[in-house]
Image: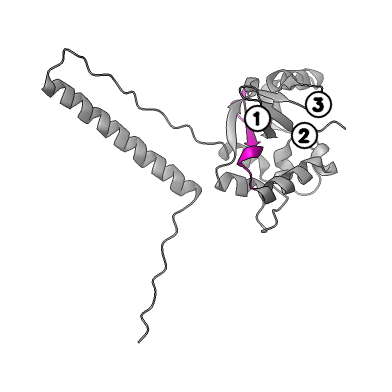
Amino acid sequence: MDLKHVGRVKADAKKCLVVFRTLPGDSSYCLIVPTELLSDSQHDAIISCVEGNTAQASFEFGEVLARVPFSDGRMMLPALHAEGKLVRIATKDIEMIPNHTTAIQLSELNQMIAEQRGTTVDELALKSPSKSEGPKSETVDVATIQEVPKVSEPDLVTPNPNATPEETAKLYRSQADKLSKEAANLRRLAEDLVPTKKPERKQMVS
C-alpha cells in the first residue's frame, strides 16, 4: 500500500513525515518532522495518524495534525512546534517514499502536481487543492509561523598573525559582543517556544 506524506532526508536517509510540502512565500522549502525526534508515544500516534484514511485523503498532512490530539490532549501540530520538532528544509533535499521501491524528490513531485493542476508550485503553498470538510482551520497560519526560525551566524574573523596585541584584543572584544548578542537572540527564541517555568515558592510551616 502506498502512503502519502512519508519521506526521508537525502543527506542521511533518515525517515521523516512531510507536514507541509511547500511554505507560503518560499515554495522551495517544506516543513517536516523527523521521526527520530519523536518520543515513543508520539511516534506511535503520528504513524497511526498518517496511515489513516483522513491523512491519506489530505493534500497536506499538517491539515490533519492541526486537528488530531496526542494522548495528553494537545493537538499534534502545535505540540510538535512547541517542542521544536518541526524542521524547515529545502524540498530538493527530501525524497518521498510512498513504498519500498519508489523514491521521488519532493521538489520534482511538487512541480508535477502543479503542472497536473494547471497552477504553479507557489500556488500549492497558498491554497490546498483538496476540499477539507468542516470549518476552516488555522492550518495556513500555522504553515507560516511554525517553521524553525533562521538564526544568523556571526562572522568570526581569524586574527591577523601580524597584528599587534592591541588590535587582536580589539578584534576578540568585537567578536565577543557579536556572540553575546547572538546568545541573547537564541535565548529569546527558546523562550518564545517554551517559556521557562519559575520555581514555586515553598511556604514556611510555622
The crowding category of the residue bearing disc 2, from other C-alpha atoms within 10 Å (few below 14, some 14 to 19, many at least 20), is: many
2 or 3: mark nearer the eye = 3
Kind of residue at disc 3: His
Sequence-first disc among 3 and 1: 1
Q: Secondary structure at mark 2?
A: loop
User: What is the C-alpha distance between the residues marked 2 and 3?
Assistant: 21 Å
Q: Quadrant of the N terminus?
A: top right
From the image, tell me which residue sits under label 3.
Answer: 100
Residue at 35 percent across and 41 percent down: it is: 184
- Quarter of the picture containing the C terminus is bottom left
Q: Name the residue at 44% across, 49% down.
A: 191
The residue that disc 2 covers is: 59
Q: Which residues are magenta?
A: 20-39
Residue 58: x, y in percent? 79, 37
Please say if the residues under marks 2 and 3 sit with CB atoms less than 8 Å apart: no
The image shows residue 191, relative to residue 147, as above or below, that is: below
Query: Which is nearer the eye, 136 or 29?
Result: 29
Indicate the amino acid at tag 2.
Answer: Phe
Image quarter for residue 190?
top left
Quarter of the image for residue 55 reads top right
Sequence-first tag of 2 and 1:
1
Quadrant of res 153? top left
What is the x, y in percent for residue 31?
A: 63, 33
Under mark 1, the amino acid is Lys
SS class of the residue under badge 3? loop
Q: Is residue 188 magenta?
A: no
The answer to whether residue 120 is above or below residue 98 is: above
Which residue bears the numbered disc 1? 14
Side of 177 relative to 151 (left or right): left
